[in-house]
Amino acid sequence: MRLESLLCAAEELRHTISNTFGIEDPAVLARRRQELVAGPIKTWAAGTERQVVGPFAGGERISIADVKLFVMAGWLKKGVLDHVPPDVLAPFERLGHLFDSVRLHPKVVEWYARSH
């Protein structure tokens, strides 16, 4: 059940962030994204951080939840969202460790090697 809640929370955050797409006024975009950083992004990261129990969310084995968390964290870490600093997840060590565990998982490495 915990992995399902992590998937849902990641999808909710993706939806919340995507609600800021298309904002044309630079001041409004900056304010809304800063609000995301201070609120939903940090809340999501802290909640996710509390639930990670090993190198992966569920312990020792990778799951689809880990891949979803990897994608979400990667999106935030890339710095591609204006007004969202790429180090927004830096305080969340377990989330960072999960990101690295997924990034270095042999199947993920293999997939990236084939797709790029």
Image (cartoon, rainbow, N blue to C red):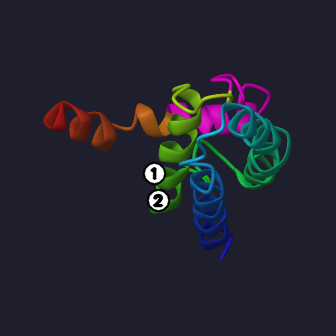
Q: CA distance from mark 2 to mark 1?
A: 7 Å
**Residue at x 74%, y 32% (from the top left corner):** 27
Q: Residues within 10 Å of mark 2 (few under 14, many from 20)?
A: some
Please, is residue 91 above or below residue 69 in the view? above
Q: Observer-nearest residue: 32 or 37?
A: 32
**Residue at x 66%, y 32% (from the top left corner):** 26
Q: Residues within 10 Å of mark 1 (few under 14, many from 20)?
A: some
Amino acid on which disc 2 is placed: Ser
Q: Position of residue 91 (x, y in %)?
A: 80, 28
Q: Which residue is mark 2?
A: 63
Q: Observer-nearest residue: 13 or 112?
A: 13
Q: Observer-nearest residue: 104 or 29?
A: 29
Q: Which quadrant of the figure has residue 86?
A: top right
Q: Which residue is mark 1?
A: 67
Q: Circles 2 and 1: CB distance less than 8 Å?
A: yes
Does any portion of residue 90 appear in the rendered image? Answer: yes
Callout in the foreground (2, 1): 1
Label 2: which secondary element: loop
Q: Position of residue 12 (x, y in %)?
A: 64, 64
Q: Residue furthest front?
A: 25
Give the magenta-colored segment's residue range.
Answer: 85-100
